[in-house]
Image (cartoon, helix red, strand yellow):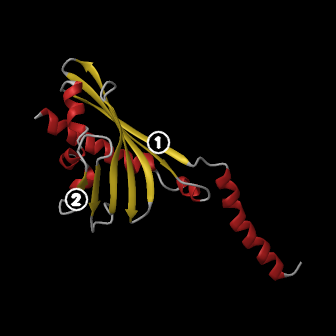
């Protein structure tokens, strides 16, 4: 076998091995964090269902207080859209739309649409449950996905830590805002 052929087989192997590996990797991930807040569950949910209130506790809003915000619709209702435009790379450009609100179960789902610095559409959710009449538990979660072969990046990117740390800080900020 000549050297050129060996090099070609080696290059094909280098390309093929990660592609084959990606077939067996998950293409989705979920990140979820929670915190207890010393307020009644209904009061906590009434606050978090308003997307405009995220400016008071969201880590991403605090990274760029100068970001441009555009709102469409009635806040706290299905179909409301909060759009942001930021020059800060970690914040970028995107929008969040309320897709579901269940006032009985005290939960809401939103769709996050990212445009810059990368494109993607993911589901986010917040759930509130009553621990007692004066204490609530808030769960903030995010479902993400990376289609094949990009799911290979899940081996190198720890979304649980990256997004989880931001959720923990945001929930801590939320607790401070609501308990003052």
Q: Quadrant of the C terminus?
A: top left
Relative to 105, residue 109 above or below: below
Residue 101 appears at what percent x and percent y? 33, 35
Question: Front-most of 95 and 174?
Answer: 95
Relative to 87, residue 127 above or below: above
Residue sitting at x 22%, y 59%: 69
Can the viewer see residue 127? no
Question: Front-most of 164 and 83?
Answer: 83
- Which picture quadrant has residue 19? bottom right
Residue sitting at x 16%, y 38%: 176
Question: Front-most of 29 and 86?
Answer: 86
Relative to 173, residue 62 above or below: below
Residue annotated with mark 1: 30
Measure the alpha-carbon separation of dots 2 and 1: 27 Å
Residue sitting at x 26%, y 38%: 49
Residue 2 appears at what percent x and percent y? 87, 81
Residue sitting at x 57%, y 59%: 150
Residue 106 appears at what percent x and percent y? 31, 28
What numbered label is drawn on residue 161? none
Question: Front-most of 65 and 45?
Answer: 45
Relative to 26, residue 106 above or below: above
Q: Are marks 2 and 1 in contact (CB under 8 Å)?
A: no
- Which picture quadrant has residue 179? top left
Foreground mark, 2 or 1, reads 2
Q: Earlier in the sequence, mark 2 or mark 1?
A: 1
- Which picture quadrant has residue 126? top left
Residue farthest to the left?
180
Residue annotated with mark 2: 69
Q: Quadrant of the N terminus?
A: bottom right
Can the viewer see residue 73? yes
Regarding mark 1 in the picture, which secondary structure is present there?
A: strand
Left/right placement of residue 102 relative to residue 68 reads right
């Amino acid at each position: 076998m000549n050297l050129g052929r060996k090099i070609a087989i080696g290059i094909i192997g280098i390309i093929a091995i990660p592609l084959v590996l990606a077939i067996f990797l998950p293409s989705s991930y979920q990140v979820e964090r929670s915190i207890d807040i010393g307020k009644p569950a209904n009061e906590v949910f009434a606050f978090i269902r308003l997307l405009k209130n995220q400016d008071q506790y969201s880590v991403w809003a605090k990274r760029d207080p100068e970001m441009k915000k555009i709102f469409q619709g009635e806040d706290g209702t299905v179909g409301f859209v909060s759009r942001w435009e930021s020059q800060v790379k970690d914040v970028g450009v995107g929008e969040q739309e309320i897709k579901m609100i269940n006032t009985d179960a005290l939960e809401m789902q939103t769709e996050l649409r990212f445009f810059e610095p990368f494109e993607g559409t993911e589901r986010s959710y917040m759930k509130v449950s009553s621990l007692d009449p004066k204490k609530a538990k808030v769960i903030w979660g995010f479902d993400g996905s990376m289609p094949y072969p990009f799911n290979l990046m899940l081996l190198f990117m720890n979304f649980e830590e990256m997004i989880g740390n931001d959720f923990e800080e945001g929930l801590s900020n939320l607790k401070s805002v609501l308990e003052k």
